[in-house]
Image: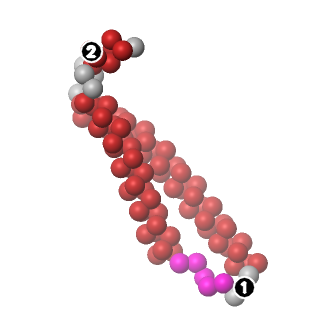
Amino acid sequence: MALGAKRSKVLWLVLGKGGRLVLTGALIGAIGAYAVGRLLVSLIPSLPTRDPGALAVISVGLLAIALLACYVPARRATRVDPMVALRYE
């Protein structure tokens, strides 16, 4: 913002970087959950089959919480006066 960026651009920059990390983690987690589910079903045949609906609901909930956790510091970063931040550094 000290170099002319608008508050909305700074907000989307921070949210974009956090969102990419969140989506990468969600993708790795979904692949891991699928693999572990197949492993458990092969080891214990009496287990009920995997529930993709539950996995989807849990994933969406965790994604929403993670994006909210990215939004709070991003919003705080847009409220900092650039001159105060430059003087602090």
Instruction: Looking at this view, name the residue that lies furthest to the right.
Output: 43
Quarter of the picture holding the N terminus: top left
Q: Nearer the viewer, mark 1 or mark 2?
A: 2
1 sits left or right of 20 in the view: left
* Residue 72 pos. (x, y %): 33, 42
Residue at (74%, 78%) from the top-left corner?
42
Q: Is residue 59 above or below residue 73?
A: below
Q: Which mark is residue 28?
A: none
Kind of residue at badge 2: Met
Q: Is residue 9 visible?
A: no
* Residue 53 pos. (x, y %): 46, 75
* Residue 66 pos. (x, y %): 42, 51
In the rendered image, which quarter is residue 47 located in?
bottom right
Label 1 to label 2: alpha-carbon separation = 64 Å
Residue of label 2: 83
Residue at (54%, 56%) from the top-left corner?
27
Earlier sequence position, callout 1 versus callout 2: 1
Residue at (39%, 14%) from the top-left corner?
89
Q: Residues within 10 Å of mark 2 (few under 14, many from 20)?
A: few
Q: Is residue 28 visible?
A: yes
Residue of label 1: 45
Q: Is residue 84 magenta?
A: no
* Residue 16 pos. (x, y %): 38, 40
SS for callout 2: helix
Instruction: Looking at this view, name the residue that lies furthest to the top.
Output: 87
Secondary structure that dominates the magenta span: loop
Q: Which residues are magenta?
A: 47-51
Looking at the image, how many numbered discs can be counted on the residues?
Answer: 2
